[in-house]
Amino acid sequence: MKVMSGLDARFLFSETRSAHMHTIKVAVVDVSARPEALTADLMAPLLSARIERLPVLRRRVLPVPHGLGNPVVIDDPDFDVRRHLAWVTAAPPGGPRELADVVARVTAVPLPRDRPMWELTVVDGLADDQVAFVVKIHHALADGVAAVALLTNTFATDDADPVVEPFRPEPVPSDRALYAATARSAVRALRSLPRLARGSFEGLRAKRAIRRDESTPVMGPFAGPRTPFNVSLTPERTFATTTLPLETLNRTRRPVGASFNDAFLTVCSGGIRRYLQRTDDLPPRSLVASVPVATRTGEPRLAGNHVDNLFLPLHTDIDDPIERLIAIHASTVAARRVRTALGVGLFEHRAGFIPPFVHMATTRTWAASGLADRVRPPLNLIVSCVPGPSRLLELDGGVITAIYSSGPILEGIGLNITAWSYGDELFVSLLGCPASLPDPWLLAEDIDAEMEALARRSPVTEPAA
């Protein structure tokens, strides 16, 4: 039995009727070389054979009565992989849009909490002998870095030393045991309070100094304008995908000294600029994005959340893509300076001091109030880019041809753009709801158009001798 960290629990307590806090991973597999067809009867044994490499999928989250502490996690004594499997046939002709429709329907349904919080939906009926695996896993269990490690561990060959954790089911603890475990965790947190207070004070003082020195504005919450993305959510979801070439993104960012993530943000920003211009909704001020940043990137981990956020202006007020790339790069450098001054783990540590019942009550009151339709949003959207596997992966005789991922949308922040690199391409997912993103494919088309515009404006560099 292990008590969840404050940050893991925060993702759990942020869930409402219309804000589902799970993430989505979609693997598209070419099964044309398989000697036999993939059937529902084969899936449970195939997954069971790999479950020791996916220990987080066996863990059940148990709440403490009355929300008096963070939940605990145990190896579920009633674990049955068949309770987590579903099979869906996509509508003809089985292309990207039909697959996206299935993903949207899967994403719209919250995960049950009487079992480990994940589901696998197999999608057949796709064109070109392809099958898709749509994995829905609660954000409380794993962030993007952990998800990549899980994927890599799943497909590691035996001689690559995959991480294997034997299944050790535990009895469901009594209420008394739950209270005792969370009480011990609370005592440990209180002991760290002086260090957290000291770090917060020193970090805020350093942050103010950096803001005075920086010529580039440093953004914070509620700095962005209102946009059509910033509304009260509905439970339904909209979903679309696109693919960007890694080589082109790298070629465009190198001459100006920008990072790969800066180039990706530039393409997203330009796509959003085009999208909002369609309906004359482009505000004169720049949109502000939350950009998740990993805080623990050492040895691979297979569970948990260790993330912070940068508040970055996307400079949607700049038309020229190269000028926008330069501006985004400058803003990223400034935001990272502030983050370093505040302390890399400060956001994570602070999350442990918010009582669960307070966080739940605040989140649900905000969702029920409908204020997201009337007040300035805390942020305009979430944009994330995660380095995925660089080599092509195989699955029981099939080759994975595409990997898409998406984090959740939040009340008043109704657009999430998530990208995973895989092979030599960047696979991009767009998630919204009917109120915030009624036709996500229009935004996907605008991102593609901006990618072409950036490539045209980028100088051609000769390879080094």
Image (spheres, rainbow, N blue to C red):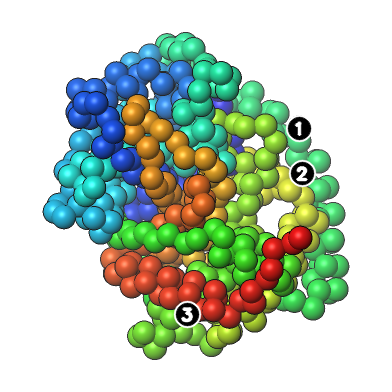
Viewer-nearest of discs 2 and 1: 2
Q: Relative to residue 275, is residue 72 depicted above or below?
A: above
Q: Residues within 10 Å of mark 3 (few under 14, many from 20)?
A: many
Task: Kindly give the residue lying farthest to the left in the view shown.
Answer: 92
- Disc 1 residue type (three-letter): Arg
Distance from label 2 to label 3 (Cα)?
40 Å
Q: Relative to residue 279, is residue 62 depicted above or below?
A: above
- Disc 2 residue type (three-letter): Leu
Q: Position of residue 327 (x, y in %)?
A: 67, 76
- Give yes or no for contact between labels 1 and 3 (Cβ–Cβ under 8 Å): no
Q: Relative to residue 49, is residue 419 depicted above or below?
A: below
As drawn, is 259 to the left or to the right of 424?
right
Q: Residues within 10 Å of mark 2 (few under 14, many from 20)?
A: some
Of callouts 2 and 3, which one flags the residue occurring earlier in the amino acid sequence?
2
Distance from label 2 to label 1 (Cα)?
10 Å
Q: Position of residue 48 (x, y in %)?
A: 35, 19
> Residue 278's quadrant in the figure?
bottom left
Q: Nearer the viewer, residue 46 or 412?
A: 46
Q: Position of residue 462 (x, y in %)?
A: 69, 68
Dot 2 lies on which element? helix
Residue 273's disc is 3
Residue 196's disc is 2
Residue 191's disc is 1
Q: Residues within 10 Å of mark 1 (few under 14, many from 20)?
A: few
Of callouts 1 and 3, which one flags the residue occurring earlier in the amino acid sequence?
1
Q: Residue at x 32, y 68 (%)?
A: 441
Q: Residue at x 26, y 37 (%)?
A: 32
As drawn, is 249 to the left or to the right of 381?
right
